[in-house]
Image (cartoon, helix red, strand yellow):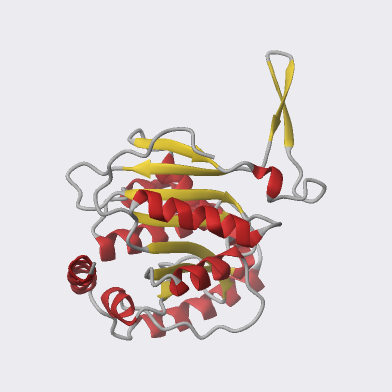
Amino acid sequence: MWEETLPELRSPMLVTAFQGWFDVGGAATGALEWLSERSDAIKVAHIDPEEFFNFAEQRPDVRLRDDRREIVWPSNDVFVLRPPDGQHDLVLVVGAEPQLSWRTYTDIIVELSSRSGASTLVTVGAHIADIPHTRPFLVTGSSADPGLAKAWGLDRPTYEGPTGIVGVLHERFERLSVPAVSLRVAVPHYVSGAPNPKGARALLERFERVTGIPTGWPELDEAAEEWEQRVNDAMNSDDDVVAYVRRLEARADARAKRSVPSPDDLGAEFERFLRQQDTSD
């Protein structure tokens, strides 16, 4: 698995996103891929897909390069991002949700967490919702850790039912007493195809505002605006769709009037949480 020795990291956080069930519009993987493509990100590992995929279902791609065939397999890559002058580094795991051997796969992620010294797991995802594409996308989250839930302004987990690799990771990390957070962005159900840069931008903005770790999310403003304009252009010829979106906008504006903790308050609370974790260790 390991291609390079992990560099020395500053109070790192482990952040994951997986294509599939919990990645509507590719917003979650799009956010981490965008981070990993920044010039200061370093690829440190690659998880061999052989054990974790049924290739008859998750088929590899064939590409032609210099008239030679190249097979591109489903990937799960690990990157390290070390923001200049930051207090925390990021260890990013991004790729396709594995189909097989989830417990073994989880063991690998736990090993990565241990070797990197990550103090917290953050999974990012995206789900469909009855929201308009013209308003800011809401990012919600949950954590079973009371201190972290308070620090990030999160709910406690309430979902019961079928789960994906994200649910398996959370259960394992919670049993190991490693704080874990699920952040998820709501995307409009009527435009759920990928890519969705507006959803990726919303996830990165919320993550940066509560952790203080720079993500460069404003650089996605133009892509998000272009995406929104393309949706406007596509729906403006259908009066029924326009009327439906207007109803969604009215509901979203009513919800927006509810008070929420300020980003500065959440960021300060998160730093206090991390200091408490360091003291307890």
Q: Is residue 19 visible?
A: no
Residue at the outermost top position: 66
Q: Is residue 155 visible?
A: yes
Residue situated in front as seen by the camera: 126 or 221 = 126
Tell me what residue is drawn at x 66 percent, y 73 percent. 240
Quadrant of the snapshot with the C terminus: bottom left
- Give coordinates of residue 182: x percent, y percent: 45, 69
Name the image quarter holding residue 269. Answer: bottom left
Residue situated in front as seen by the camera: 52 or 226 = 52
Q: Is residue 238 above or below residue 11?
A: below
Q: Is residue 199 above or below residue 80?
A: below
Residue situated in front as seen by the camera: 69 or 103 = 103
Q: Is residue 98 above or below residue 177?
A: above
- Give coordinates of residue 110: x percent, y percent: 47, 58
Tell me what residue is drawn at x 20 percent, y 49 percent. 86
Image position of 157 (left or right of 115): right
Counting every numbered tag in the picture gives 0
Image position of 275 (left or right of 222): left
Tell me what residue is drawn at x 41 percent, y 70 percent. 181
Tell me what residue is drawn at x 47 percent, y 76 percent. 249
Residue at the outermost right position: 56
Residue situated in front as seen by the camera: 252 or 181 = 181
- Give coordinates of residue 104: x percent, y percent: 61, 57
Quadrant of the snapshot with the N terminus: top right
